[in-house]
Amino acid sequence: MSVAEIEAAITQLTAEDLASLMQWIEQYHAKAWDDQIEDDLQAGRLDPMLAEVDKEYDAGMAEPL
């Protein structure tokens, strides 16, 4: 199924079904994002950024939320 076919099918949805689809897409996207972050953490791709955050925190550049 192509993106164009999916788009055409979406235009045929009822308002209720569209809302349900949008909620599902939002949840799916959030999980994909969480999975990517976890993969990046496990692979060490975020290590340089986290080291910089630790350095700034140790230097007193952070404030409690």
Image: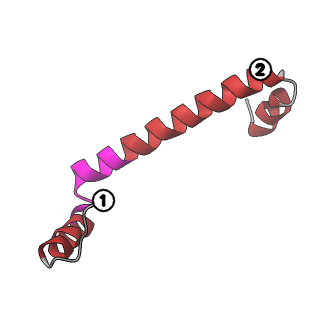
Relative to 15, residue 63 above or below: below
Give the structural element (helix, strand or loop) at label 2: helix
Q: Residue at x 85, y 32 (%)?
A: 8
Relative to 59, residue 31 above or below: above
Provide residue 64's location: percent of width, then percent of height.
25, 62
Q: Is residue 16 left or right of residue 22?
A: right
Please give the residue where the numbered disc 2 appears in the rendered image.
Answer: 16
Q: Quadrant of residue 9?
A: top right
Mark whose residue sits in front, 1 or 2: 1
Extreme-left residue of the structure: 58
Q: Residue at x 39, y 46 (%)?
A: 36
Nearer-the-camera pick, 16 or 61: 61
Magenta range: 37-47
Please give the residue where the numbered disc 1 appears in the rendered image.
Answer: 65
Q: Amino acid at mark 1?
A: Leu
Q: Amino acid at mark 2?
A: Glu
Provide residue 19's location: percent of width, then percent of height.
72, 27
Q: Residue at x 81, y 32 (%)?
A: 5
Q: Is residue 32 magenta?
A: no
Q: Residues within 10 Å of mark 1 (few under 14, many from 20)?
A: few
Provide residue 41's location: percent of width, then percent of height.
26, 51
How many numbered marks, from 0 up? 2
| Sequence-wise first label, 1 or 2 | 2
Which colour scheme appears in the figure? secondary structure
Which quadrant: the C terminus? bottom left
**Of helix, strand and loop, which mostly describes the magenta segment?**
helix
The tag on residue 56 is none
